[in-house]
Amino acid sequence: MRSAVAAALDRAVAHIATLPEQPAYVDTAAAVAASKSLVEPMPTSPTPLDDLLAELFDRHAAASFTTAGPGYLAYIPGGGLFHAAIADLVADAVNRYTGVLAAAPGFAQIERNVVRWFAEIVGYPAETGGFLTSGGSLANLGAIVAARVDRLGERFLDGTIYVSDQVHHCVSKAARIAGFPRANLRVIPADERFRMPVAAVERAILEDRERGRRPFLLVASAGTTNSGAVDPLPALADLAARHGLWYHVDAAYGGFFALTERGRAILAGIERADSIVLDPHKGLFLPYGTGALLVRDVATLEAAHSEHADYMPTLQDDPELVDPCEISPELSKPFRGLRVWLPFKMHGAGPFRRNLDEKLDLTRWIAERLRALDGIEILAEPQLSTLAFAVEAGPGTGAGAAAEANRRTEELLAAILRRGRVHLTATSLRGRFAIRICVLSFRTHLDRMEACLEDIEAALAETLAS
Ligand SMILES: Cc1ncc(COP(=O)(O)O)c(C=O)c1O
């Protein structure tokens, strides 16, 4: 065991130590084509671990996005705090059963504590219910199911859900998985700052009521993936209350900024939600595989998930104790709480708070410089740690000017990526091809943002000269 772990650890440490020098942008097209040749028969003879580690690190890790590196400003960065690897090693080696409290009370309570800490971060009461899952997609599904059971009961096909056109696509996917036809999702166009327009949502709710539909769920975003926009959370809370809707906030990206003073101000009103999704593998810098659903009234989670079977161990009826399997869809499950608990206990919340604050500063730093660049236009100002920009549309107005700006912005992105120091991705904002910058890795600091700016400037000069 020792030598096997030491071999893996040597590889992992060497890999992590070289992250700043690894190309930040890796074009994986060749590896995608080559992946077809990876189909392999089931092994019938052993292979030495060193050979397997060489394949994983030298071949596959090298030909993939450098998601854990400091130059990864793409999509929503996933961090990769090494403490989680230690936690996973302990959790998997001990392999206790955390689906049922009686099987591993201390471990299950550790997970419960993590949910309590998250509740504290967003301003929820301590008795908040919730569970950890694989990520934001399944956490949002959990919220929709809880809302459906609580507000509609078993005959739910006339229930309608309200989202903006900036909501993460996992919400519409979750609505379908939860049994709702696509037509039950009301997608309201966002305002000029990419935020949910309260009056338009209210009109849609009233129209649906008139038609005999049952509006039951309003989903706001606290940090959209597209542009980092935070919906008007207090006004939406009022709206949901006025019409008796379950109010859910998808804060998978933005929620942990509530650890900072500025973030708390931007996210004010989130605490009025019936449920909130947070993604520790985004805002707490953990490796992929940990999302969280918080629900104000734990009884609603229980109503959606509780089942009984004769072969199960004794479940709890003490209101202060919770069996994870009674309030979540999983029974056997990984001990995810340890990945959060270990780094928080080892270092306290301070480093998380400081790192998130730094990300807010870095985003404002680069926004200010981009604003001053001739030929660049900011399409989405930073609300948290994401912004979007493009090559300025020329003096002509209308589709022609926008199409030309889109073409040049696409060229600009390619020229930035060719330099290999940052990985940026694109999106579409009101018909404009937009380059996004999302700063969320604990490994990203000012030096990398300076490199990012230099590369944008050089790539812009190249693009404008062509
Ligand atoms: C706002 C938002 N919600 C939900 C998700 C989905 O989360 P996951 O990828 O963890 O399933 C994402 C992912 O980027 C997101 O940014």
Image (tube, helix red, strand yellow):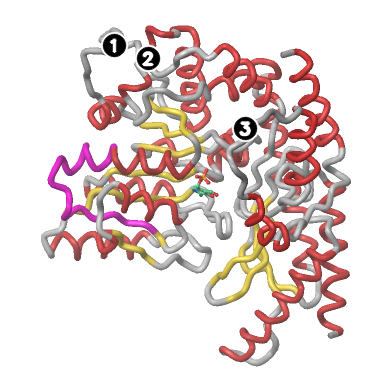
Q: Secondary structure at mark 3?
A: loop
Disc on res. 44: 3
* 84 on left or right of 208: right
Q: Is residue 248 above or below residue 387?
A: above
Q: Pointer 1 and pointer 2: residues touching (CB < 8 Å)? A: yes
- x, y percent for residue 179: 25, 50
Mark 1 nearby-residue class (10 Å; few <14, some 14–19, many ≥20): some
In the image, what residue type sits under mark 2? Val
Image: magenta residue range? 146-163
Dot 2 or dot 3: first in sequence order is 3
Find residue 315 and name its label: 1
Toward which corner of the image does residue 7 lie, by quadrant?
Answer: top right
Q: Is residue 220 magenta?
A: no
Looking at the rendered structure, the kind of residue marked 1 is Leu
Closer to the camera, 237 or 409? 409
Give the camera-side residue of 411 and 218: 411
- Horizontal side, residue 220 vs residue 464: left or right: left
Q: How dense is the environment of label 3, judged by Cα within 10 Å: few (below 14), some, or many (20 and up)?
A: few
Residue 94: x, y in percent?
57, 11
On the rendered image, what quadrant is the N terminus found in? Answer: top right
